[in-house]
Amino acid sequence: MHTLILGHAFFHIKKFAHRRFSFKYIQVIMALRFMTAEEAAQFVKNGDQVGFSGFTAAGVPKAVPSAIAKIAEEEHAKGRPFKINVVTGASSGDPLDGALSRAKAIGFRAPYQNNLDIRNAINAQEVDYVDMHLSQLAQEVRYGFYGVIDVAIVEAADVTENGEIVLTSGVGNIQTYTRMAKKVIVELNHKHKKELKGIHDICELKDPPHREAIPVFKVNDRCGSPVLKVDPNKIVAVVETELGNSMSKFTPIDETTAKIGQNVADFLVSQLRLGIIPKEFLPLQSGVGNVANAVLGCLGQNPEVPAFTMYTEVIQDSVVKLMKNGRITFASGCSLTVTDEAMADIYHNLPFFKDKFVLRPAEISNSPEVIRRLGVISINTALEADIFGNVNSTHVLGTKMMNGIGGSGDFTRNAYISIFTCPSIQKDGKISPIVPMVSHLDHSEHSVNIIITEQGIADLRGKTPIQRAKTIIENCVHPDFKELLWDYLKLGKTAHTPITLQAALGMHIEFAKSGDMRKTNWADYIK
């Protein structure tokens, strides 16, 4: 092994000869086990449970997962089994979920995904997928619910011989995976600057009955270390890469998305005027995508809204822009899920941004304790909502997994005000995301305060089920579906929640049959 280390040390120095290396840095190189991704992947065996760093594609290892996928393909070609159990912080992007899924190398996956290949494998029952609240996985791994962690693979901007790792643009649950793992593999990614040190706040919670309060009382408070500390004896390989996150840009904001964003902003301003939201405003959490960007853009342009903070999971390009404009003063999250252009902008202006971001583990960024203490306003997307205020975030027609619940439940259940958004129609008007009963329940009526579409705003606070139904139909439903939903509501007998069981999923049944919910005929379900 010493010869291998020595060879890779000199290879490293030669490869990056254009850089100046101190004697100390060369000593670090000699102490660490540098090797190729293909060599490092050999440490991962069939049946292993592997924990990966990162949150979305940000901070996720990229070279070693692809090398593991090649091993799987070679083993399968020889007629031998090769699958691993994959645990991450959230979704992971194509180099991990995509490559391993195409190689049929994943046996078990948690807690979230958004890759087409693994989604198809999950819905074909080729991958065992456990959809989870993101705040819970690290602690449940520690509790022993999911067995041991055999290998942890972490993307790093820097690593020292004593096991101090500067993470890159995402954290996830790697603080637990590396501590519990038998072996640790480090992807040292030179695309990221080691000057990122200081932007992270790495803290691992103690398990009950020894858990203490999380000392985060303001969005910019810190509770941990700027580096991830790993037992250096566990580090079996260091793999050098220069691979970017390749974060795809979101599609341009269309008329519907812009109107939803404006409605959310208008609602928040109304609450500010009423004094329901304090005059200094409250931290925001928003999901990923165009609606979130539209909301932030509208808030940023509104002179009634003071400069505000974010306590969220994912920090997007729109946040970077609003920081430069002075409209967002600080953002706490689990990842910088930004395009390569935005990441380059951050690095170019690192002295400006460094004291305005903090990246934390998911069990801190999504902590119910901290969310409730800070009074976070949550804004998340619904796949569908029903007229009584229940929300489905995950399953198409109640059966096919889309991505997962992610952190929406962590924030919704503990928010100062919880908001869900969705368009009022989909698929050229053939689908209404507002239905009599959701086909899968992720967030119950007890957690959902506000539903907003491009049609308008339904404030459900303090309303009975029948009042909620009337409010949602009147304010949020598309005109093509209003009469249909009013007619459904009339079917119900006098009751606290007037559900007509035989017709409740009638719109879903009609779509499965004809492909158009507008053709629903309630008489077919009440004979």
Image (cartoon, helix red, strand yellow):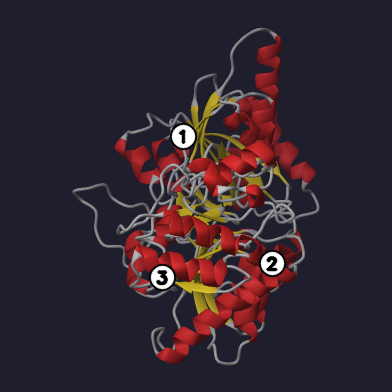
Q: How crowded is mark 3: few (under 14 residues within 10 Å), some or many (20 or more)?
A: many
The residue type indicated by label 3 comes to: Leu
Residue mark closest to the camera, 2 vs 3: 3
Q: Rounded to the nearest whole Å, what is the CA distance between mark 2 and mark 3?
A: 43 Å
Q: Residues within 10 Å of mark 1 (few under 14, many from 20)?
A: some
Query: Relative to residue 87, is residue 483 depicted above or below?
Result: below
Query: Relative to residue 515, is residue 329 depicted above or below?
Result: below
Residue 197 position in % (x across, y down): 55, 62
Q: Nearer the viewer, residue 491 or 265?
A: 491
Whether label 2 touches label 3, CB < 8 Å: no
Q: Quadrant of residue 96?
A: top right
Write down the residue under mark 2.
347
Write down the residue under mark 3.
460
The residue type indicated by label 2 comes to: Tyr
Q: Residue furthest right?
A: 18
- Disc 2 secondary structure class: helix
The residue type indicated by label 1 comes to: Lys
Residue mark closest to the camera, 2 vs 1: 2
Q: Is residue 67 visible?
A: no
Q: In which quarter of the image is the N terminus?
A: top right
Residue 187 position in % (x across, y down): 62, 42
Q: Residue 412 carries which label?
A: none
Q: Identify the mark nearer the N-term, 2 or 3.
A: 2
Q: Identify the mark nearer the N-term, 2 or 1.
A: 1
